[in-house]
Image: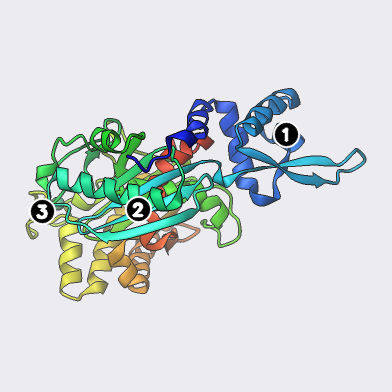
Amino acid sequence: MAYVNRTNAESGVNLLALRSHNAALVLDLLRTAGEGGISRLELAERTGLTPQAVSKITARLRADGLVAEAGRRASTGGKPRTVLRLVPEAGHAVGLHLDRDEMTVVLCDLTGAVVAERRVPLDLGAGADAVVESAAGEVEALLARAGVSVLGAGVALPGPLDHSRGVLHRVTGFPEWDGFPLRDALAGRLGVPVVVDKDTNAAALGIAVVGRESGIGKTGDVAPGPLESFAYLHLGTGLGAGLVIGGGVHRGARTGAGEFGHQVIQLDGPPCGCGNRGCIEALCLAAVDRGAVGEAARVLGVGAANLVGLLDIDLVLLGGRTVAAHEEAFVRGVGAVLEERARLEGVDDGAIPVRVAPGGARGVAEGAAQLLLAPLFGRGED
Ligand SMILES: [Zn+2]
């Protein structure tokens, strides 16, 4: 707590007060314009707001230190236009990834870029008090080193959980977490706002927000426009999915969507930690344990094909530690199942693509920081 610099908290307060729809539109255009910046006239053209409204909003953003002049740009005929850019260091958020056996903490600036990072071992079964204390200690240590205040902290961990209330359910393998109010416990300990979500949703959110700039898309690696619909399948110590539909994370009515790993695909299959038998997670992890990565990839592919058939998404992205250890085998194996399904269905333009998710080992933690950052830019909600 002592490390949170309260004297510099004003920018955070202003940022949270700025959450009007029009300001978010303008901020998002400034964010995606990058260092090159964008003029007020372009902002007006692209938002549909009047130049007067844009001037009013940008004046306020400049007064708050969120936006700065980035020089002048020649314009056809008239006088050179002043170009504005986002000030990335005007605000920061923490992203915390609590996995079953390790914790990753990142500090991100307004653009989502990681400016500091820590990774330490964690026992998610060590009890709520110990885990909260350990997580808070890591966050404080990171903030002390960076010397900044933050908008808040996003926390991502295995589900199921209640995102809107920040309360955990029976995390597979760790039923003792059921009912624990993680959001309020951490917010009380850190003294900043906290948002809790599943690891899969956080990773999917991070990709949805920055994916446009990274140029990931169905049609190839050249800037394809925003990522509108995709599934992020996370195979690490468990298996889950983050679903992005219409540009936002689809969490469902009770924020329980994406429990991909516990769909039963073999009625008389091996027991799973969730209490059922033959879950895709149990089959997949058992195959990996046996060294049968090709079989694990086929099992994952069957689940991915079910999802593609149900939701008609554009792209399947694979992430998580187990995928990272065998990237090529998983991309090939899952892709083969999707191709076979597309062939059986007679789809004209072929199977939807399968790729390794961007972000690597810290993709979940980066996405967790976006739980705080994305709403400032009007992004990520479905
Ligand atoms: Zn299960």
Circle 2 residue: 105
Circle 1 residue: 45
Q: Which mark is residue 380?
A: none
- Of helix, strand and loop, which one carries label 3? loop
Pinpoint residue 309: horizontal percent, then vertical percent. 35, 50
Judge left or right: residue 312 versus residue 113: left
In the image, residue 341 sits, relative to residue 133, either above or below, namely below
Judge left or right: residue 341 versus residue 282: right
Which quarter of the picture shows residue 249? top left
Circle 3 residue: 273
Q: Would you call the spot at circle 3 few (<14 residues within 10 Å), some (14-19), or many (20 or more)? A: some
Q: Would you call the spot at circle 1 few (<14 residues within 10 Å), some (14-19), or many (20 or more)? A: few
Q: Would you call the spot at circle 2 few (<14 residues within 10 Å), some (14-19), or many (20 or more)? A: many
Mark 3 residue's CB less than 8 Å from ligand 1? yes
Residue in the foreground of this view, choosing between 151 and 1: 1
Judge left or right: residue 243 versus residue 292: right
Judge left or right: residue 295 versus residue 106: left
N-terminal of the pair, mark 3 or mark 1, is 1
| Residue 157 in sight | no
Residue in the foreground of this view, choosing between 364 and 234: 364
In the image, residue 149 sits, relative to residue 351, either above or below, namely above
